[in-house]
Amino acid sequence: MNSHTHNRKASGASAPRPRSCSFIRHALWLALDFVLLQAGPLPGAVFGANSATINNIYYPLNVPAKFTYRGTGNVSQYSGTHQATAIETVDGVSCIKVVDDAPDGILYEWLAQDTTGAGWGLRKYDVSTGEYEEEDELYMVPNPQVGDRFELWMLDYEVLSTTEQVTVPAGTYRGCLHLRCIDPAWPGQEEFYAPW
């Protein structure tokens, strides 16, 4: 098996990033249950030949999947699309290229799944600024358990449940992952992710 180890940059060395429209765009996925998690606790990841096969139950993805999302409540003005457009290679790792089109601009992301089943973002490109971000970000762990803690969006989260039932405009979902932010920057923020 050919594999490539992709090392993460050290986290925790800098202050948490402020929440932006990009965060809001990802948070809006709750309404349609397509939410991305970023950053993570792993010092590295091993990617095999099937790294562009993303079948994690909380974040499955394949080309040409396209998701349209819209905000509700206090973020009802936000909407956009998230489309898997191609399979491309980043640092020797086969990735799915995703185009996010949202009110704050267009963002390209290259996503892959490691050999444990964790989903990773290996690169981002902001079309409006012309800038790349090369820091690896964990999008979803392979088997979250109650009490587990993860770094997401540079903030610390804890798993409260893996059996929640959640109702949003898109429908009712069972067996959802329930996370709570335990970071002082956003204490008590809760997020839910439905299995596929």
Image: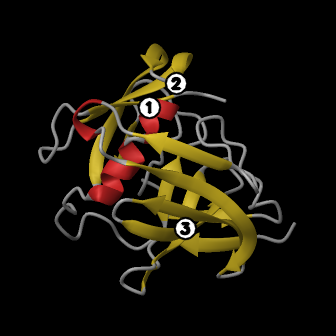
Question: Which residue: 51% across, 22% down?
Answer: 176
Name the residue at 41% across, 57% down.
Answer: 39
User: Can you see residue 153?
Assistant: no
Q: Earlier in the sequence, mark 3 or mark 2?
A: 3
| Element under disc 2 | loop
From the image, tell me which residue sits under label 1.
Answer: 31
Residue 109 disc label: 3
Q: Residue at x 74, y 68 (%)?
A: 86
Q: Is residue 101 above or below residue 169?
A: below
Q: Position of residue 78 (x, y in %)?
A: 34, 47
- Please say if 81 is above or below 97: above
Horizontal arrangement in the rendering, residue 128 relative to residue 154 (left or right): right
The amino acid type, in three-letter code, at marker 3 is: Glu
Sequence-first tag of 1 and 2: 1
The secondary element bearing badge 3 is classed as: strand
Marks 1,2: beta carbons within 8 A: yes
The earlier-in-sequence mark between 3 and 1 is: 1
Indicate the amino acid at tag 2.
Answer: Ala
Mark 2, residue position: 170
For the point 32% across and 53% down, the residue is: 23
